[in-house]
Amino acid sequence: MLPSAKGSEELVIVLFTWLIAAGGFTHVIAGSNEIFTLVLNGEMNIFTAFIYHIAPVLIGNILGGTGLFAMLAYGQVHEEM
């Protein structure tokens, strides 16, 4: 979307950031830092970390990122189809 923004790049970034925060979504890379800190401090075991925290967020990021990319790609080429 940024190449199509033509001067509104900051607005696009803020909008997507707001949508992620409003939906309560997390990112696997950013969130895993917090989870692995809990594991290293002994407050959570590694099995719980992977099964209940890392895996669901990873699956969500894969599905959500793929869906978002597909919609954006379609939006760029739908007039040519």
Image (tube, rainbow, N blue to C red):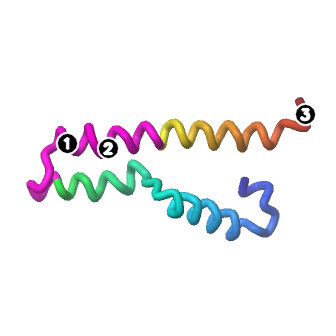
Chief SS of the magenta region:
helix
Between marks 1 and 2, how big is the CA–CA gap? 9 Å
Q: Amino acid at mark 3?
A: Glu
Q: Amino acid at mark 2?
A: Ile
Q: First in sequence: mark 1 or mark 2? A: 1
Between marks 2 and 3, how big is the CA–CA gap? 39 Å
Find numbered disc 1 in the image and state the secondary structure of the residue it sits on: helix
- Left or right of 80? Residue 70 is left
- Which residue is identified by label 2? 54
- Which residue is identified by label 3? 80
Between marks 3 and 1, how big is the CA–CA gap? 48 Å
> Relative to residue 36, is residue 8 depicted above or below?
below
Task: Give the residue drawn at x 81%, y 63%.
Answer: 6
The range drawn in magenta is 39-60
Find numbered disc 3 in the image and state the secondary structure of the residue it sits on: loop
- Which residue is identified by label 1? 48
Q: Quadrant of residue 72?
A: top right
| Marker disc for residue 81 | none
Task: Give the residue drawn at x 23%, y 45%.
Answer: 49
- Left or right of 74? Residue 41 is left
Residue 2 point in image, percent of width and height: 72, 57
Q: Nearer the viewer, mark 3 or mark 1?
A: 1
Residue 61 point in image, percent of width and height: 48, 43
